[in-house]
Image (cartoon, rainbow, N blue to C red):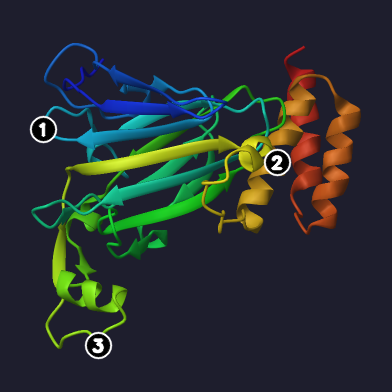
Amino acid sequence: MVKLKNVTLYLWAIFVAGCTSVSEVSTQAHPANKKATSPAELNWQELSLPADINFEFNEKSQVLLDNNSTGPVASFVIPADRGPVDMVLTSHVGKELTLYEPNVLVTNSKGRVLYHIKSNEFKYIPARLLDGDRVQKQFTIVPQIGADQVNVLIYTTSDDLKGSTTVINPAKAFAIGTGKQPPMIPDLTAVHSEYGQLNLTITAVSQTNLNPIRPAIDYVPEIEAKSAYYLNSIENSVEQGDIDHAMTLVSEAEKLGIPSARATFINAVQSRNEHK
């Protein structure tokens, strides 16, 4: 077993169900001064919904080195038994003009990939009032039917670390914000780094109307995500012996143009029969 490097992720969880409470959580990786080579070796932090957390990547953070990740990572487990959840991940530009360029990998409890959100899908948002420069992505996760939880891994890649993000010059931003002609001066460059400050908010879709300050969601799962959702749900229904529901899912999937739904159903039934 590969040991992990010590990690201290400072999290501030804000629960908005009626009142606001802040809890600071310090997580420790398994013993000492080594790096993980697979997600299974990471220290996974369980979150409750709704959640609004800040966390920091620094020299003490847990590190994952595999085919995707090359540096500090955050790994969370979130409930999936309430249906779809809305998520917003924000990475802030640091005072030294550095930026952690995030990617998000969402898997089920068996490690099957449900969503893969790459760094180029994050949108740069210039500083405004008390909010500094940042990149942000808003998205919705639709868990498998019958799933209790999903795993959320936030990481950066070697290609990300080679890049940079253009940041609007503060003088320009101030002029634009006050309705003046922006000066003809060059913008700044934020170098991508393995360290940074991030924020993650998670809200169950059924709770969205109870949280008016929540940003609107601009991400809807494309056909690949819908395909993964239906295929996973068909397999899960068959595993639980709910064949009628699995057949209903097959019918819905085929109407959406997912051609492998019926084959997935047949394979799942055969596999279940073989293991009886």
Cα separation, mark 2 vs mark 3, equals 53 Å
Say what secondary structure mark 1 lies in: loop
Residue at numbered disc 2 = 231
Task: Report which quarter residue 28 is drawn in.
Answer: top left
User: Mark 3 vs mark 1: which is more N-terminal?
Assistant: 1
Numbered marks: total? 3
Residue type, mark 2 in image: Leu
Residue type indicated by callout 1: Glu
Q: Residue at x 68, y 36 (%)?
A: 206
Left or right of 215 in this view: 158:
left
Quarter of the rendering containing residue 54: top left
Q: Residues within 10 Å of mark 3 (few under 14, many from 20)?
A: few
Q: Is residue 168 visible?
A: yes
Measure how far apart labels 1 and 2 are at the Cα level.
40 Å
Farthest residue, direction left: 96
Residue for badge 1: 59
Q: Nearer the viewer, mark 2 or mark 3?
A: 3
* Residue 167 versus residue 97 in the image, above or below: below
Dot 3 falls on a residue whose secondary structure is loop
Q: Residues within 10 Å of mark 1 (few under 14, many from 20)?
A: some
Q: Position of residue 165 (x, y in %)?
A: 22, 65
From the image, tell me which residue sits under label 3.
181
Q: Residue 35 at what x, y percent from top left?
A: 19, 27
Q: Earlier in the sequence, mark 1 or mark 2?
A: 1
Q: Quadrant of the N terminus?
A: top left
Q: Is residue 196 above or below residue 2?
A: below
- Mark 1 touches mark 2? (CB < 8 Å): no
Spot occupied by residue 197 in the image (x, y as percentages of width and height): 23, 42
